[in-house]
Amino acid sequence: MSQESLHGLTMGDHILNIKNRGRQRGGLLVALLPLVLGLPWAVGGAEMISLHTLSRTPGFQPLTTRADQAVLATRSQRLQLYKDSRRAIFDGVTIWLNAPVEKSWGRWQIARADVTHTVQPLFNPASALAAKGHTVVVLDAGHGGKDQGASLPGGKLIEKELTLELAQAVRDILRRQQVDVRLTRSADRQLALAERSRLAGAWRAAVFISIHFNAAANAQAAGIETHILAPSGCSITAQPAARGADAQACLGNRHDGANMVLGYLMQKSLLKYTRAEDRGVRRSRFMVLRNSPCPAALIECGFLSHPAEQKKIMSAAYRRDMARGIAEGILSYLRAVQRARAAQP
C-alpha cells in the first residue's frame, strides 16, 4: 500500500497538448486530426470529442456500437468503451479513463483529455516515446524502517519486506539482460518520498517503478493495479470529479503519454505472469508519481487482506512469477522506446 494512501495526500498536475508530428508506420496519424480536436462538446464540465469523428482518422476502422458499448479499433488494436463509465478495455487490459464516455442521441463522445492522454499513446506509443530515455531503471521498494506498510497479524507478511524482496528479484532479472538498475533502498531503512524521486533524478532514470502491496477493510477486494499520474484538471480514479488543486502542474506530467504506455505494459505483463484479477491502470496523484523526473508507475501487487490472494503471495513461486511480470513489463517498455527512437528521421 502506498504511503500516501495512508495519509490521503493529493496534488495537481499538468496537461500536454497533441502536436502533429507526421505519420506512424501503418498509416495511423501520430497526431489525431485537427478536425477531431476542433469539435468539442461540454458535458459535465469536460470537453468531449465525437468518437464517430475520431474513428474517421486514417488507420482506424469505423466505430462499432451496441446499446451501451462502443469499440474504437485498428486492424490490430481494440479499445472497448462503455456508456457513462470511466472503465475501458484496451487489448484485454482494463484502463480507467479520465472522464466517463457519454452517449447522447446515438452519438458517442469521449473526453478531450482521453483523446490526448489515453487514445493517442495507446494506439500510437511512438508519439509518446520517441524522445524518452531507455538506459537507467530505478526500482523503488515501498515503505521501510519504521514504516512497515500493510501487514498481517503475527507478522506473517509485511509489506516493506515483500517490496524489498521483489525489487531485488526484479533487479537481478534485469541485470541479466544488461539493464542498468538502481534501487532506492537495498536494506530495511526508512526513506522519505521526496528522497525517492530525488534519487531517480540524480541517477538520470529513464523509468521509475514503485512497488507496493495492497490491503483493504473489504476482504473481498483482490487483484493487481497499476497507478499512473492523472492529467491536470482530471480527477483521480478514486474520486468522481476533479478538485481545484487538481489543476496544479507538477513535474511528472511532462511524461503523461509515456506514463500511459508504461502503465499499460506493466499491467499487461503482471496479469500475464500472475493471472491475478485485473483492477486496471488507474489515475492517481501519489507523491512519487507527481515528482518523478521520468515516466513512472506505482504498482500494487495484490491484497494482503484477501485470503486467497494472501495465500498466493506467501508462495515463493508466485512471487518469482510476479518478479518476472514486473521485469518483462519494464523490458517491453524499454524496447518500445528503442523502436520509437530508431523510427525517427
Image: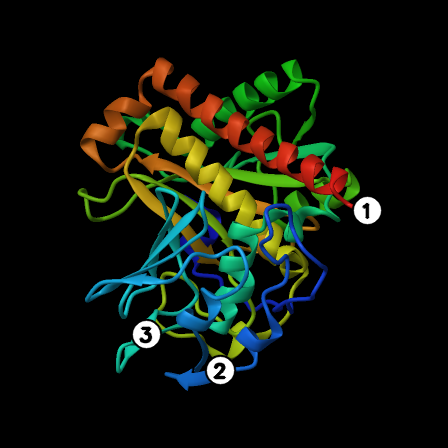
The answer to whether 13 appears left or right of 298 in the picture is right
Looking at marks 3 and 2 on the same chain, the residue that comes earlier in the sequence is marked by 2
Q: How far is mark 3 from mark 2, CA to CA?
A: 13 Å
Mark identifier at residue 345:
1
* Residue type indicated by callout 3: Glu
Residue 130 or residue 278, whichever sits in front: 130
Looking at marks 3 and 1 on the same chain, the residue that comes earlier in the sequence is marked by 3
Which secondary structure lies at badge 2? Answer: strand
Which secondary structure lies at badge 1? Answer: loop
Q: Nearer the viewer, mark 2 or mark 1?
A: 1
The answer to whether 208 appears left or right of 78 in the picture is right
Which secondary structure lies at badge 3? Answer: strand
Q: Is residue 50 above or below residue 146?
A: below
Q: Is residue 168 above or below residue 340?
A: above
Q: How far is mark 3 from mark 1, CA to CA?
A: 39 Å
Residue found at x 52% / y 32% = 329
Mark 1, residues whose alpha carbon is within 10 Å: few (<14), some, or many (≥20)?
A: few
* Residue type indicated by callout 1: Pro
Residue 320 appears at what percent x and percent y?
Answer: 43, 17
Residue found at x 43% / y 61% = 8
Residue 303 appears at what percent x and percent y?
Answer: 30, 37
Mark 3, residues whose alpha carbon is within 10 Å: few (<14), some, or many (≥20)?
A: many
Residue 219 or residue 34, whichever sits in front: 34
Looking at marks 2 and 1 on the same chain, the residue that comes earlier in the sequence is marked by 2
Q: Is residue 122 visible?
A: yes
